[in-house]
Amino acid sequence: MMSEEVKPAPRRRPSASIANSLQASETVALVAQQSPYRERLETVSIPQSLVAGLLGKIAECREMIARGQRGTSGRQVASAEEQSARAELLAVIRQMQAFASQKFARDAEQRHRLADYGIGKRLGSSRAALAQQVVTLLTALEADNLPGVTPALKATLLTARESWVATSSQQSAQQGTATGSRAEAKVLAKEITDTRIQIQYAIEGLYPASDPTCTAARTAFLLPEKRPFRG
């Protein structure tokens, strides 16, 4: 009989891993404030100021994570808005392409002018390409008197371009906020973990696994009951 394939466990998202680590650190810090642990930790160079600072950093790190999550949500909203603005901009460009084709498509000597309007190219292949195409099109319009391209239609193009640029910038800003906050949270989380482990090692020395009477203390500080703590 063939054995069933064992699927690997799904990887945790970094934010979930950090949240779990913060929870463990908070538990250790809160217990470290209690008597008699508070007094005994003082004797091994773990002052209450260090413990209070640890709790403050935990709160700060959680706020960083929250900012990252808000930034991600904002980026998703901004992305939807950008797609809508992009679609409106492309619609106006295609309308002008139709008028350019009306004037140049059947003229062998002027047919090359269609390229100035993006005809024959993939519109919107990237943000940079679309932004450049709008500039090229506007420059071409200054020299050509296309049928159907009224001042109102030109104004519509400019408005659509401005709207798209604004939403594109907003999305980039939201992405930057999310990425920056997550990076800051990751750095601070490591500092928090290092301090928590420092406290746990102190407890390891004060309440060794070899002493059965230390079980309650070791459990409170998230240490193995019957074997040494290794970080």
Image (spheres, rainbow, N blue to C red):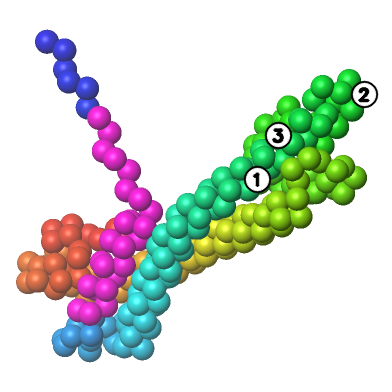
- Residue range highlighted in magenta: 7-31
Say whether disc 1 or disc 3 marks the residue closer to the N-terminus.
1
Image-quadrant location for residue 107: top right
Q: Nearer the viewer, residue 174 or 91?
A: 91
Q: Is residue 101 magenta?
A: no
Give coordinates of residue 110: x percent, y percent.
89, 27
The C terminus appears in which quarter of the rendering? bottom left
Q: Which residue is mark 2?
A: 109
For disc 1, the neighbor class at 10 Å (few under 14, some 14 to 19, many from 20) is some
* Magenta-drawn stretch contains 27: yes
Image side of residue 219 versus residue 229, left or right: left
**Residue found farthest to the left:** 213
Residue under label 3:
98
In three-dimensional space, the C-alpha distance between marks 3 and 2, rounded to whole angstroms, equals: 18 Å
Q: Give the amino acid at mark 2.
A: Glu
Residue 182: percent from left, percent from top: 46, 62
Asked whether, in this view, residue 155 is left or right of residue 225, the answer is right
Quadrant of res 171? bottom right
Please give the label number shown on residue 92: 1
